[in-house]
C-alpha cells in the first residue's frame, strides 16, 4: 500500500484522521505522540483529515445519484425521520446552518416507543440540495420501503418540503417541545399586557395538549388572544398552532406507538456537529465544514471502516490517474524536445537523384561535350576524314 505523506504508516495515518475527527487537531497530534510515539503537528493533522474528508465527500455525493450502488438495509416496520438545523461558526464572524436528518427504528418496550438503530446525514447546504444529497442515507435505511414512517420535527417549511420529497405519505408529528414552547410564548405576552393567568396555567395547557389533543387548547389560546386585544406578538404563534393542528394529535400518536418528540435530531446536532465544531475559539473555513461532517457521521453511524476503505480506493485511483497523466506529459515533452534537436543538429537530407533518361535530351551538358569529344578522337572518324 502506498504510504501517505510524511511517511506515516497506514495504521498511524488512519489513527491520526480518526482522532482528528473526535477532537481538535492540536489535541489529536498530542494524543498520537502519547499513544504511538509519533510526533505530528497541528497543520499535519488538519491536512490529513481534510484530504480524507474531501475524498469521502465525493463518494457520498456520487451515492446520492438514483442509479448508484450502495448497501441497503432491510426494510423496517416503523421508521422515524427527524430533520433540523443548527448553526456553525465560520471565519470572519459569519454563521451558517448545518442541516441534519436522523433516522431510527421504532420499537415498543413496556408500552413505550423506543428509537434504536440511529443514523445521521449532515451537510451545510441549501434545503433543495440537502434533500437531494440526503437521498443516499434515505435509500440505505429503507425509508421508501418501510411499512410506516413518521416525520417528527418542528414546523419549518423547508422541513416539510424535505418530507414531501422522500416520503409523501409519512405521518407528520409536530415536536411536542416546540408546541409547548409556543404556549409559553403566548402566556408571556399575555402577562406582559396585564392579563392575569392562574399559576400553572401553562403546565395545564401542555398536559391537556399531550393527553387530549389540540382542540381545547386552541380554543383557550384564541380567547386569550382576543382578551389581550389581539396583539401582533400573539398572532404569529396562534397562526402557527392553527396551521399545524392536524400534526398535534398526540393521544392518537402515542396509542399507535409513535414518539412525539424530536429528541433524536436535537441530540444529533450536538453529537455530530456541535461536539466537534463549536469548541472555544473555533471558526471554520466554509469549504472545510462538509468534509469534516462526513467523517463525523461515519463515526456516529459506526461506518468508519466502510468509509475508510472507500476513500482509500478513491485516492489510490486518483493517484494512478495523476501518475499516468504525468507520464503522458513527460513523454509529450520529450518527443517535442527530440524533434527540436534533430531539426537543429542534423543536416537536411540530400535531394532525390534525377533518373537517367535515354537519348541526348536526358543528358547533362558535360555528358554531351564528352560524347562529342569521343566521336572526334575515334579511328573511324579519322579514317572517314582522310577519305
Image: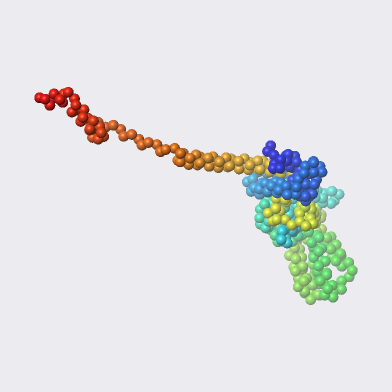
Residue reaching furthest right?
199
| Residue 326 image offset from top left, x and y in percent | 58, 42
Does residue 198 appear in the picture of this structure? yes
Residue at image point 73% right, 47% down: 44
Outermost residue toward the left in this view: 387
Of 27 and 364, the residue lying toward us: 364
Q: Position of residue 383 (x, y in %)?
A: 13, 23
Where residue 315 appears, x then y in whole percent?
A: 66, 43
Say which quarter of the image contains residue 11: top right
Q: Check the image and report above or below for 2 versus 289.
A: above
Relative side of 27 to 313, left or right: right
* Residue 195 image offset from top left, x and y in percent: 85, 74
Is 58 positioned to the left or the right of 229 in the image?
A: left
Q: Residue at x 53, y 42 (%)?
A: 333
**Which residue corresponds to the image point at 87% horizontal and 73% vertical from the top-left?**
196
| Render colour scheme | rainbow
* Residue 302 in sight in this render: no
Which quadrant of the rendered structure holds the N terminus? top right
Q: Is residue 341 above or below residue 188?
A: above
Is 167 rendered above or below residue 313?
A: below
Q: Residue at x 67, y 58 (%)?
A: 126
The quadrant of the image that shows the C terminus is top left
Amino acid at each position: 500500500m502506498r504510504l501517505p505523506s510524511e511517511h506515516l504508516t497506514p495504521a498511524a495515518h488512519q489513527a491520526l484522521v480518526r482522532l482528528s475527527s473526535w477532537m481538535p487537531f492540536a489535541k489529536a497530534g498530542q494524543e498520537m505522540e502519547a499513544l504511538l510515539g509519533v510526533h505530528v503537528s497541528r497543520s499535519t493533522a488538519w491536512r490529513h483529515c481534510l484530504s480524507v474528508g474531501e475524498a469521502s465527500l465525493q463518494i457520498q455525493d456520487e451515492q446520492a445519484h438514483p442509479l448508484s450502488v450502495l448497501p441497503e438495509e432491510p426494510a423496517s416496520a416503523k421508521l422515524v425521520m427527524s430533520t433540523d438545523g443548527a448553526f456553525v461558526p465560520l471565519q470572519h464572524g459569519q454563521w451558517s446552518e448545518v442541516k441534519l436528518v436522523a433516522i431510527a427504528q421504532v420499537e415498543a418496550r413496556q408500552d413505550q416507543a423506543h428509537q434504536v438503530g440511529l443514523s445521521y446525514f449532515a451537510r451545510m447546504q441549501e434545503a433543495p440540495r440537502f434533500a437531494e444529497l440526503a437521498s443516499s442515507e434515505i435509500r440505505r435505511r429503507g425509508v421508501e420501503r418501510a411499512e410506516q414512517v413518521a416525520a417528527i420535527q418542528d414546523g419549518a417549511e423547508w422541513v416539510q418540503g424535505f418530507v414531501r420529497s422522500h416520503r409523501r405519505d409519512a405521518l407528520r408529528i409536530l415536536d411536542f417541545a416546540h408546541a409547548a414552547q409556543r404556549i409559553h410564548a403566548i402566556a408571556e405576552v399575555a402577562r406582559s399586557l396585564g392579563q392575569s393567568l392562574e399559576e400553572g396555567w401553562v403546565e395545564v395547557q401542555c398536559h391537556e395538549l399531550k393527553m387530549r389533543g389540540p382542540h381545547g387548547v386552541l380554543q383557550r389560546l384564541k380567547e386569550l388572544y382576543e382578551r389581550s386585544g389581539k396583539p401582533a406578538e400573539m398572532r404569529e404563534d396562534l397562526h402557527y398552532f392553527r396551521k399545524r393542528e392536524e400534526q398535534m394529535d398526540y393521544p392518537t400518536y402515542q396509542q399507535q406507538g409513535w414518539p412525539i418528540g424530536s429528541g433524536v435530531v436535537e441530540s444529533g446536532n450536538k453529537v455530530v456537529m456541535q461536539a466537534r465544531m463549536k469548541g472555544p475559539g473555533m471558526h471554520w473555513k466554509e469549504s472545510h465544514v462538509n468534509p469534516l461532517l462526513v467523517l463525523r457521521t461515519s463515526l456516529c453511524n459506526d461506518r468508519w471502516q466502510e468509509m475508510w476503505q472507500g476513500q482509500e480506493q478513491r485516492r489510490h485511483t486518483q493517484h494512478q490517474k495523476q501518475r499516468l497523466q504525468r507520464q503522458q506529459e513527460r513523454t509529450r515533452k520529450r518527443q517535442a524536445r527530440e524533434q527540436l534537436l534533430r531539426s537543429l543538429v542534423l543536416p537536411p537530407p540530400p535531394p532525390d537523384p534525377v533518373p537517367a533518361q535515354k537519348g541526348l535530351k536526358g543528358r547533362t551538358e558535360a555528358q554531351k561535350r564528352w560524347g562529342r569529344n569521343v566521336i572526334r578522337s575515334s579511328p573511324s572518324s579519322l579514317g572517314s576524314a582522310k577519305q
